[in-house]
Amino acid sequence: MDAIARAYYGIHNALFSRLRYADGLAPLALRLYLVPIFWMAGTQKIAGMDNTIEWFGNPDWGLGLPMPWLMAHLAAYTEAIGALLLLLGLATRWISIPLMVTMLVAIFAVHWPNGWPAIADSSSQEVAVRLGAANEILREHGNYSWLTEKGKFVILNNGIEFGVTYLLMLFALLFTGGGRYTSVDYFLARLWPSGR
């Protein structure tokens, strides 16, 4: 058994130790994945700020958050500026924290009542009936082939799945930073190493 373990770890270390030279690629991939998500979310809130404030504050059909003017501006600008910082890999760890806060607010204030899945399970009888009815209406009253040429219709469940995914990606960036060789943070740390 000892020989098998030694052989395994010998192969493991020989193969995977080389990955350390490219360890900046994983944080870069996370950052680039998150950039358009936060950019679109932030800029859409900014462009429709009056509606965003109303949605943040309205307890009947919105989020019912306190101080909606402040909360809407904080969320919108955190997302938009955060997207730019993630793109550059600048202040990656710092911006991950307020972005995680926006994700937690979204998870609990918006998506939590809808459960986990972002897209409803089409194998569920209840969802399948609704989806079938929607497809029939579109076939009868719309250009169905044009509407479906880019993919099938789905019913959005709007659960916490995407919010939790983005939260975990930001959590990883909090620990890894922007990435070696792939972020402004890395080069700034080389210019001004700690202890000087």
Image (spheres, rainbow, N blue to C red):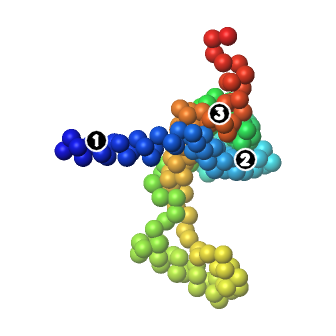
- Tell me the amino acid under the disc marked 1: Arg
Q: Which mark is residue 76?
A: none
Q: Residues within 10 Å of mark 3 (few under 14, many from 20)?
A: many
- Residue type for callout 3: Thr
Residue closest to the far top: 196
Please tell me whether mark 2 sits on a helix, a strand or a loop: helix
Q: Is 173 or 152 nearer to us in this picture?
A: 173
Residue bearing mark 3:
92
> At x 68% / y 24%, what residue is drawn?
190
Tell which residue pokes out farthest to the right in this image. 47
Residue name at image x 72 percent, y 33 percent: 184
Question: Could you tell which of marks 3 and 1 lies nearer the N-terminus?
Answer: 1
Q: Residues within 10 Å of mark 2 (few under 14, many from 20)?
A: many
Marker disc for residue 6? 1
At a point 37% along the width and 46% down the height, the residue shown is: 11
For the question of whether residue 7 can be seen, the reply is: yes
State left or right for residue 56 relative to residue 170: right
Quadrant occupied by the C terminus: top right
- From the viewer's perspective, is residue 127 above or below residue 133? above
Quadrant for residue 153, please give it: bottom right
Which residue, given by chain and number where applicable, does mark 2 sit on? Answer: 39
Picture coordinates of residue 4, whole percent (x, y) = 24, 46
User: Does residue 108 lie above or below 92 as drawn?
Assistant: below
* Mark 3 or 1: the one toward you: 1
Q: Secondary structure at mark 1?
A: helix
Quarter of the image for the N terminus: give it: top left
Left or right of 75 on screen, residue 7: left
Q: How many residues crowd mark 1 within 10 Å: few (<14), some (14–19), many (20+)?
A: few
